[in-house]
Amino acid sequence: MVISKNLNSVIMKNIYLKFSLVLLVMLFSCSEEKITGEDFGIVEGKVVSAVTFLPLANVKVFSNPNSSIVFTDEKGKFSISGVKIGQYSFEAQKEGYITKYEPATVNINSATNIVFELKLSTTNNKPPTAPILVTPKDNAQNQNLELNLIWTSSDPEKDSLTYDITLRKDSNSDIVVYSKITKPNFSLKNLTYSTKYYWQVSVSDGINVPVLSEVHSFTTTSFPNARFTIVKKVNDNNVIYSGNDGGNIIQLTSSNMNSWRPRKNKQSNKIAFIRASGAQNHIYTMNEDGSGVFKVTNSIPIAGFNSEFINFSWNTSGSQIIYPYFDKLYRINSDGSGLTKIYQTADGKFISECDWSFDNTKIALKVNNANGYNSEIFVINTSGVIISQIISGFTGAMGGLNFSVTGQKIIFSRDISGFEDANYRQLDARVFQHVFSTGVTTEVGIDKPVGTLDLDARYSPNEAEIIIVNTSNDGLSVKNIVRFTPAINNLGASRVVLFSEAYMPDWE
């Protein structure tokens, strides 16, 4: 019985030891197991303005689900530590700004970076007042070509304001915008003479929709002694300009339209010209400043063998215009009424040019075949009867008719080389003058440079000078308008370029 008792004691001790070992293993295992929701990370970042990207201080930053609430420092930075891992929506709040939300995932023992870009709140912000245009006054006249625009505007919250100016001309649809102006004034430069401008100012506080002023206008000072009209090429279009004795010019027709062959009439203060209109060319008129464009011809356009060399003419009062349509010559009132055929060639030749004498009794015509050659120049009366033959029977090109004021002389150009080709190229075009009282035609000695052409000759208003278009005979070089003054009182003759890269002149 003693042995049995001892054996039982040993067995109990073994059971106790095994139980203790199992319990220790269980406790050790439990101490190594991770408990979900008790791991943490860090969230840090920066808050800046969405417009300037400058840092914003004292911005309240917190999350949903809830975490600590922090505020940004002077550099716009913030940091939130001890944030349990998981998915969050962080929020940035500052008075005067729209609250911004950014999603974020917080990971264990790592930093999550967030950048907030806050926009100014427009909820309570009022827009600036509409600008009031102060200088120049609306419809102001004779303004300088350098002009200071002045206006006023204010903002209820004293927000920083910027301005845009929209400027356009009355003569075309071109618009110029001057942006990001920070003061309520702006200096315009390089304005053009005799031009009406429209201007408008918009103001922005960077928060609200920009506010517009009324539209005002002003007109610049008149172009001094603008007695010339000329044509220049702009891209692929002919563009008409007005010019003065100093070679200064202002644009009259739009660069987006093909307009050429200007003819000024002083009594009506109108300029007639040719303009492409669809597949046809028509005669238009405009005021001397380029405004008031009116289409004169309609049912019968102006047409001939080459639109670049075709011409038309006013009567003295400016009430009527004559123009060619292939082999026919028409007269039309300047208001578009009264279309009448007054002449037709007997042999089918095209009428390319015409000029109406100052006394309205004679019309000079230049006719040619379909290639521009076999030319003749003669004079008819207003009934269409030929009264004078000037020149015929020569080969080569002719053109550029212009009566003197008395109607006793007429000038024109002729290529004395007699050259003819399919491109209507000329080699040695010179200016000639025909005197009706003697019937004699002679070359005008104007010292033309060798290898060049003198074309489109026009008398000066006092007939003391002549303007011509001079260009190389290569058919490619630029054209210049030259002013020729003959020798007077022991002073030698002179040729001076008045307008460079220009052609089709008129001098009234």
Image (cartoon, helix red, strand yellow):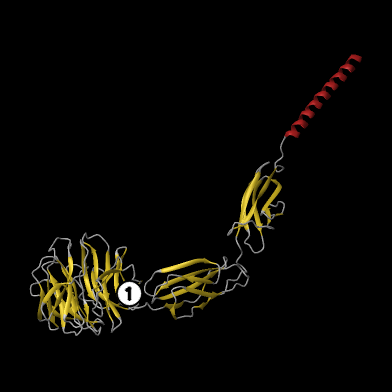
Residue 271 visible, this angle: yes
The answer to whether any part of residue 130 appears in the image is no
Q: Amino acid at mark 1?
A: Asp
Q: Residues within 10 Å of mark 1 (few under 14, many from 20)?
A: some
Where's the N terminus, which quadrant? top right
Location of residue 29 in the rendering, given as x and y in whole percent from the top left corner = 74, 31
| Left or right of 257 on screen, residue 110 | right
Q: What residue is rendered at 15% in x and 60% in y?
A: 422
Question: Residue at point 50% right, 66% down?
Answer: 179
Whole-percent x and y of residue 410? 17, 77
Q: Is residue 338 above or below residue 151?
A: below
Q: Which residue is mark 1?
A: 245
Task: Give the secondary structure at mark 1.
Answer: loop
Quarter the C terminus occupies? bottom left
Horizontal side of residue 423 vs 216, given as left or right: left
Q: Is residue 97 above or below residue 388?
A: above
108 and 425: which one is in front?
Answer: 425
Name the side, left or right, on which 428 lies relative to 24: left
Left or right of 237 in this view: 352: left
Image quarter of residue 498 = bottom left
Task: Using the image as rendered, state which of residue 483 and residue 305 is in the foreground.
Answer: 483
> Can you give x and y, in whole percent of width and height, for residue 318 in the image?
25, 83
Residue 326 image position (x, y, % from top left): 15, 72
Name which quarter of the figure residue 32 lies in: top right
